[in-house]
Every structure is written in C-alpha cells, then in structure tokens.
Amino acid sequence: MTPTERFVRRRRIRVIRRCLLRGGYCCERGWYAEGERWARRAGRVLRRTDPAGRAPLLVELATLWHGLTRYADAYGCAREAAELLPGLPPGPGRDGPLADALVRMGDVGRRQARYGEAEGHLRRALALVDGADHARGAAVRLALGVLCKETGRHDEAGARYREALLLLERHGGDPLMEADARHNLAGLAHARGVPGGEGHARAAIGLRSGVLGPAHPQVAGDLAVLGAVLAAEGRHDEAEETLLRAEAVFRRSLGADHYEVAVCLVNLAYLDALRGRAREAGRRYREALRIKRLALGDDHPEVARLAAAVRGRPPS
C-alpha cells in the first residue's frame, strides 16, 4: 500500500467513525431520522474501504442500525461482517466483533420467526465469548434468553437473563444493558404469571431514564412491559395510563406504523375488553393487526395468532 493509499484509508476510517459516533448520539436521544442520515453516510464511505478494515466497522454500523430499529439494514451489515471476519487472524480482535455480528443476525432472525437459524447464530456467538469479556457475555445471554422465551423455553430464558444480570452486577457495566436484563425478567414474569415483574420493570425504567431521559423510546419499551404487568394484576387504571404514555412516545419517535405501537395497542385493547368497551377493543385490535402485518408480514406466527383472535371476536 502506497503512502497515498494509507492516507486515504485512514481518512475514510476517521469519517466513518465520526458518522457512527454522531449516529449513536442521535440514537441515544431518540432522534432516529437524523441518526439514519449519519448511518447511511457511514455506509456509503464504508463501501469504498478495503475488506480487511471493513469488517469491524460493519459490526459497529450494524449495531447502530439495530439501535435505530432498522433491522434489515442491521442484518445486512452483520452478515457481511460475519463473512469477512473469519478471514482475519484468530484472537479477541476477530472473535469479539464476530460474536457481535452473530448476535445482531440472531436477533433479526428471531424477529422474523427464523428461530432455528437465529439460535444457530446465538449459540455460535456464545462459544466465541471469552470468559473475561463480561459485557459481550451478558449481551449474548440476553439475546439467547429472548429467543428461548419466544419459543416457550421459559426455564432456560430465566437462567440466561439471571446469568447476564449477575455478570453485570459483579463486574460493573453498561446500565442500559442492566436495564435490558431487568426488562426481560419483567416480561418473563408476566408471561409465566408469577410475581416480581413490577420490580424489575420499574428498575429498568429508573436505569434507562437516568441515561436517556424519560421520553426515549427505549424507556417507553420498559413502560409497555410495566403496563402489561399492571394489567395482569388487575390494576387497570395504572396500566392504562402507563400504556398510553408508552404509545405516545412510540408514535412520536418511531411513527404510527411501528411494531411497538402495535404492542401497546394489543395491551390497551385487552384492557378495553376487560372493562366492557367492546367497540374500542375491536378498533385497537384491528389497528394492531394492520401494523403487525406491515412490520412482520402475513406469514409471521405473531400475525397469525392476532388475526385469529380478531376473527374470533364478536362484531363491535
């Protein structure tokens, strides 16, 4: 490589990292449209970078896209990185980014109901994580736990969440990742109908609000879990207020047709049905089904379950 080529390469990498930093800053503050502009600029420059230097940057870009909830873009970057990284020398510089790429691919595969493929990526990532890399170890366990929960393996899901939380508590780490662990434990308690969900949900809200502020869409995700827990406990007024707060943040930050809006609508419709508000329940269920079809496609199991529930409801 000539001196001029080295200079151009270094300059491109600096531009990419600046774009990724600015995109991450926007993502943390919920400025998703601005974050996307920085991510797309990073991607354009990245395409002109040589393959040897591209792979770790692709992983960082995949992480940014994932944070922006642009999962197809995240998967594409992660898959390209996973194809390039095995060609690098073995060691932490290769295995850590490869594990990150596999986690991104596994998470997107899970969201698209490609459960076997997703689990293969996540088990491979778990085998790559070094025992001293506590943050990556926690991230892989959280992703694998979510997959286990969605496929009905609640015992393993709980074990993975608790392992992740223990790593974070023992060794210190990202409060946002601890919030993820608490959020997931709250959701699992709700799914199993056991106590403890409210405490975990409120802890997640406190941790995440302290870093991102109360109006961030990730905080809204914690509010949505808390609302579901409160609804299951029969605390309907508190649940409705909490879910409406979450829905408003999602609509403002992510748009009216985002998947998370549909999640809130389903829980609000459940409350409407409990209170005898059949017309409002039907409206919300139908709107949730429309959004989930847009987000997931007609063939997704979640869409099929909701469609069957809507068909089975009496006319309102």
Image (spheres, rainbow, N blue to C red):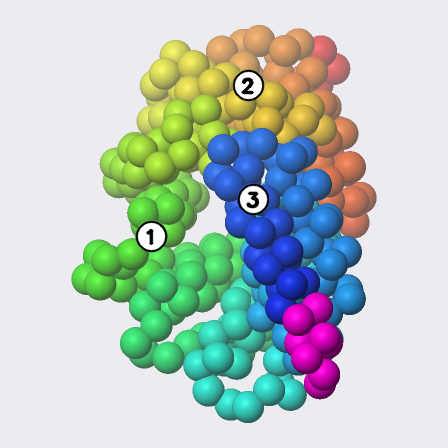
Q: Is residue 211 visible?
A: yes
Coordinates of residue 293 in the picture (x, y in percent): 76, 38
Q: Is residue 155 something one can see in this rendering?
A: no
Q: How far is disc 1 from disc 2 in space, using C-alphas?
A: 27 Å
Nearest the viewer among 315 and 87 is: 87
Tell me: residue 236, above or below residue 3.
above
- Amino acid at dot 1: Asp
Q: Secondary structure at mark 3?
A: helix
Residue under label 1: 174
Amino acid type, residue under disc 3 in the picture: Arg
- Looking at the picture, how far across and down is residue 191, in whole percent? 43, 44
150 left or right of 194 in image: right
Q: Is 132 on the left or on the right of 141, as rendered?
A: left
Q: Is residue 163 left or right of residue 92?
A: left
State which tag comes first along the sequence, 1 or 2: 1
Q: Quadrant of residue 194?
A: top left
Amino acid identity at mark 2 = Ala
Whether residue 207 appears in magenta in the rendering, the answer is no
Which residue is tagged 3?
22
Spot the residue most to the front.
3
Quadrant location of the N terminus?
bottom right
Which mark, by number, is residue 248? 2
Q: Is residue 195 left or right of residue 150?
A: left
Q: Assign a secondary structure to mark 1.
A: loop
Give residue 280's quadrant in the image.
top right
Which residue is painted at 29% across and 56% down in the image? 173
Does the CB distance between marks 2 and 3 fall below 8 Å? no
Of circles 1 and 2, which is in front?
Answer: 1
Q: Residue furthest bottom?
A: 89
